[in-house]
Image (spheres, helix red, strand yellow):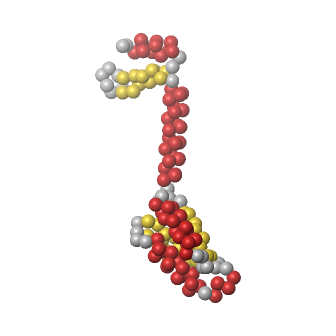
């Protein structure tokens, strides 16, 4: 139809006439509510930005004491594995209490034990860091 007829239809419906393909012969236009279209497009872009932020890996923290039992350690390891499968990084903190500070080598042994129990495909980011009463190391999947 002619551009005048299309404009008349758009005016009659109270919406806008939007040019889709200007280079086509004849030009392609669409009768839409431009404000509604812009609003929907803005919402879609916001949703895409939110999804992109969610995809970034988070840093999860798991605190482990030196005197932890094997069953409790197994539960913590399952949680750590779940975090790693989700693509998150995990900061493993070995917490020292009271006189345990005199035996820092036990903390290193516990950290090595945890990393060995996590299995293959684990990458330690940087060297273990001792800060205050905590020995920590960040791990992620390859």
What residue appears at the point 52 percent right and 37 percent down from the top-left corner?
42
Residue 26 in the image: x percent, y percent? Answer: 32, 20
Q: Quadrant of the C terminus?
A: bottom left
Q: Return the residue nearer the eye: 117 or 43.
A: 117
The extreme left residue here reads 25
In the rendered image, residue 115, in percent from the top left (x then y), is placed at 48, 74
- Nearer to us in this view, 64 or 71: 71
- The answer to whether 141 appears left or right of 133 in the picture is left
Looking at the picture, does residue 87 appear above or below residue 17?
Answer: below
Q: Is residue 97 above or below residue 53?
A: below
The answer to which quarter of the image holds residue 93 is bottom right
Query: Which residue shows up at 69% across the image and 82% down it?
Result: 98
**Residue situated furthest right in the rendering:** 98
User: Whole-percent x and y of residue 82?
Assistant: 50, 61
- Residue at 60% over, 76% down: 68
State the residue lying farthest toward the bottom: 102
Residue 43 position (above or below residue 9): below
Left or right: 5, with 92 as reference point: left
In depth, the one of 94 and 54 nearer the eye is 94
Q: Report if residue 83 is visible in the image.
A: yes
Q: Nearer the viewer, residue 50 or 135?
A: 135
For the question of whether residue 80 can be seen, the reply is no
Location of residue 133 with respect to 57 vertically, above or below: below
Q: Residue at x 52, y 82 (%)?
A: 109
Q: Quadrant of the N terminus?
A: top left
Number of disc labels: 0
């Amino acid at each position: 139809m002619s551009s005048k007829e299309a404009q008349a239809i758009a005016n009659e419906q109270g919406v806008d006439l939007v040019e889709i393909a200007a280079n086509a012969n004849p030009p392609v236009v669409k009768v839409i509510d431009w404000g509604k279209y812009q609003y929907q497009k803005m919402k879609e872009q916001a949703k895409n930005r939110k999804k992109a932020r969610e995809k970034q890996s988070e840093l999860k923290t798991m605190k482990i004491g030196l005197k932890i039992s094997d069953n409790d350690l197994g539960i913590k390891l399952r949680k750590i594995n779940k975090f790693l499968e989700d693509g998150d990084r995990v900061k493993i903190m070995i917490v020292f209490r009271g006189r345990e500070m005199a035996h820092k080598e036990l903390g290193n042994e516990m950290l090595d034990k945890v990393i060995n129990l996590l299995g293959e495909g684990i990458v330690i980011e940087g060297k273990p860091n001792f800060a205050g009463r905590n020995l920590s190391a960040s791990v992620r999947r390859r």
